[in-house]
Image: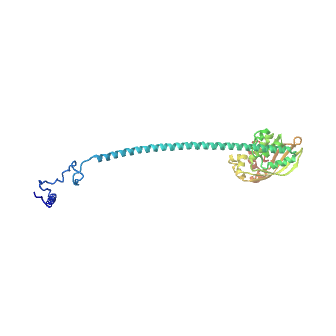
Amino acid sequence: MRARPLTNVYTAVSSSNITGEFPGSKSFQSTPATTAPDVSKRTSHDPVDVNATPLSVDYPNDLDAHKRKKSSTLNMTRKRQRMSFTDTDEEDVELRRSRRRVNMQRYRNKIRMHADTLEADVQQLREEIQKLQLKHHTLLATSKKSTAWGVAAEYFRLFPYGLRGGFTSTEPHDLIEAPSSGSSEQRGFLIANMAADVIGPKGCGLQKLVEGLRKLTLYLPTMSTQLVRLETGPRDSIIASTRVEVTITANAIRLAFPHLIHNKKRSRFASMLQGQQLVTQGVVHFEWDSDSSRVTLLQSKADLLTPMLKILGDLETVASVFQEALITPECTLSSKD
């Protein structure tokens, strides 16, 4: 048998690729484009028709839904955790603030108590200093041999503006315990040089003397007394001539002449007197006990009538001004006091 030439075979195969027919076999039709390919019979070498209908697979969509659900659940959990953490943080902050407020209040109370203690200690030290100063001046006054002239001169040195404050007891020891009763020098002088039954502006006794001096200073706070000369009087007494200056202030009118304020008819007299400066002559009388070397009488007077008359104009008006006043025209305490 005679072999067929290879050229013809190649030509036949090539023709079959174009016409869909192989040599020596039956002719067949091409697979329609709309027919779904047989996946089970396909190999990796088979061509894939991109126009073929895709397979219906639901798994990817289910996976996305599952992921979205899981993400939503995770977000809600994180949100709850953040809310829980936020509430916890707010509670911690409020607790810290509350503790800080309590600590600050305790600190302030401690500082306040410390300040009160220091203030009390300072006040106690001041009182002790005043007591020691009073004892010192009292010892100085009693250690020297007192004379009537020396006591009178010392009085005008210590009391040019009266007595500031007031004693609260008649006992010398209690007088020492009263730091508001004038200066320590004033108190020491009175205790050392005044007799227990000394006669003063308000009566007998050291307490009465102090009370009279204090009230006169209260009613006329601007009054000043200057010593002009000292003279010897009868029975070992000393007569001191003085120059007295008084400025009538609103406070002096309110305290010494209160009836001028409460009476409408006399209120114009208060306006006439307010701000006026009275300059007049005065006298202070000392009686001296040589045996005890102490003062047994201390009284003072000053002429307020003459300067008042110059201001008010007539005696009737002056009498009306002093009618219910707490001081007299002689600058002493009235019986109404």
Foreground pick, 40 / 23: 23
| Vertical position of residue 202 compared to residue 310: above or below | above
Left or right placement of residue 66 versus residue 199 in this view: left
**Residue 26, percent from left and from top:** 11, 53
User: Which residue extends farthest bottom?
Assistant: 7
Residue 300 visible in the current orientation? yes
Asked which quadrant contains residue 172, the reply is: top right
Asked which quadrant contains residue 114, the reply is: top right
**Residue 116, percent from left and from top:** 66, 43
Q: How is the image coloured?
A: rainbow
Q: Quadrant of the N terminus?
A: bottom left
Residue occupying the point 73% across, 43% down:
125
Left or right placement of residue 116 versus residue 293 in this view: left
- Number of numbered discs: 0
Left or right placement of residue 197 versus residue 81 in this view: right
**Residue 224, percent from left and from top:** 78, 51
Foreground pick, 160 / 271: 160
